[in-house]
Image (cartoon, rainbow, N blue to C red):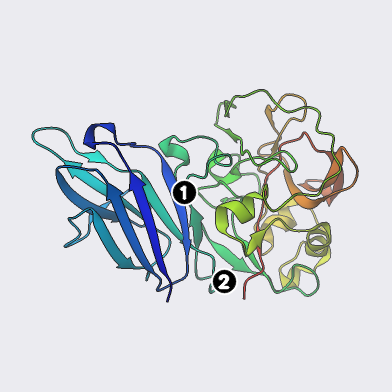
Amino acid sequence: MKHIIYSLITMCAFALPTSAQQTLVVDLNDTIHLDIDQARGNLQWQITYDSINWQNIAGADSAAFSTIADSLPAGYRLQIEEGNCNPLFSEAVWVTQTASITCGVDSVGHGFVAGFTPDTSAQFANRIYSTVQANWGGPGGNSCWLNMNLGATTEADSALDPSPSASGWYWQFNRAQAYAHDAAGNRTPNTPWINPINEVQDWTPANDPCTQLLGSNWRLPTQAEWNNFLSASAANGGVGNGDLSDAFSSTLRIHAGGRANGGSGVSQDRGNQAYFWSSEENSNNTAGSFRFGGVGSFPVNATKNFGMAVRCICDCP
């Protein structure tokens, strides 16, 4: 059993960060030590399993707190009260698991990760994803996949579900930063769009959002793994060389999450088509992607400046 120490540093109760969050990766049944420096007032550690409903932890009323990671993912924060002031809250620590999981039963999650999550606002703070076990042979088969797009908060309810909550976030090839588009098409962050992207480089682990958000066992699928999913039979949970409807009926429940335009970053095709990156480039300015639509599902040699959805696969023990 590992013992993990995590410290939250603050100057005083009146200067506490209230929206920041960090992710702590542990194994089940690890011991976690949380500590906050230079806080004053009445202290109370709290826990959440959904990032919305926080509960006081009985007896956890001092600056240092230890617990066993027996139910993951979970979030922890310290509530601080002083005099007649409103309660303040420390930076939240989102604790997630990257060791062996029971695929199709266990969920995985993450909190805010600087440089990846769209921004520090509460709407992007925590994500929890269901998992699904593939049942086809070959590359990517018999593996654990996310059952949702990375960045999504809900599973799609139809092949043409256009909701941002199901579409998740978009990434340009081998770029860490995620982009979120709301229902009106507003993009977060609304920074200058990177165009063109010209480099000889597959997606590196340091920029792979699956690895950096979910842990070292998770990564983007290769082109061979996506191609194998396209050709795998419907009886085994694959697409069977079918269209978007067949992809939604598959084990991965692919839906029309759309993409971000390569020239401008504007949201497009949401509710019509699905696009996903692989982890491999094809040239200095193109990379392997996969399109699912009404006329069929097939690989696309796309320019790297497009923003596309990400679906993660796990090299789980």
User: Which residue is under mark 1?
Assistant: 111
Q: Amino acid at mark 1?
A: Gly
Residue 51 seen in the figure: no
The quarter of the displayed image where residue 306 is located: top right
Q: What residue is rendered at 71% in x and 35% in y?
A: 269
Q: Residue furthest left?
A: 83
Please identify, in this view, whether the residue under mark 1 or under mark 2 is nearer the observer: 1
Q: Nearer the viewer, residue 233 or 28?
A: 28
Q: What residue is rendered at 56% in x and 57% in y?
A: 214
Q: Report the side of 59 relative to 283 (left or right).
A: left
Q: Amino acid at mark 2?
A: Cys
Q: How many numbered dots are placed on residues in this image?
A: 2
* Rendered position, 231 above or below 309: below
Say few, some or many: other residues with alpha carbon within 10 Å of mark 1 (under 14 / 14 to 19 / 20 or more).
many
Q: Which mark is residue 103?
A: 2
In percent of width and height, residue 286 lies at 86, 40
Dot 1 or dot 2: first in sequence order is 2
Q: Nearer the viewer, residue 43 or 229?
A: 43
Distance CA(mark 1)–CA(mark 2)? 21 Å
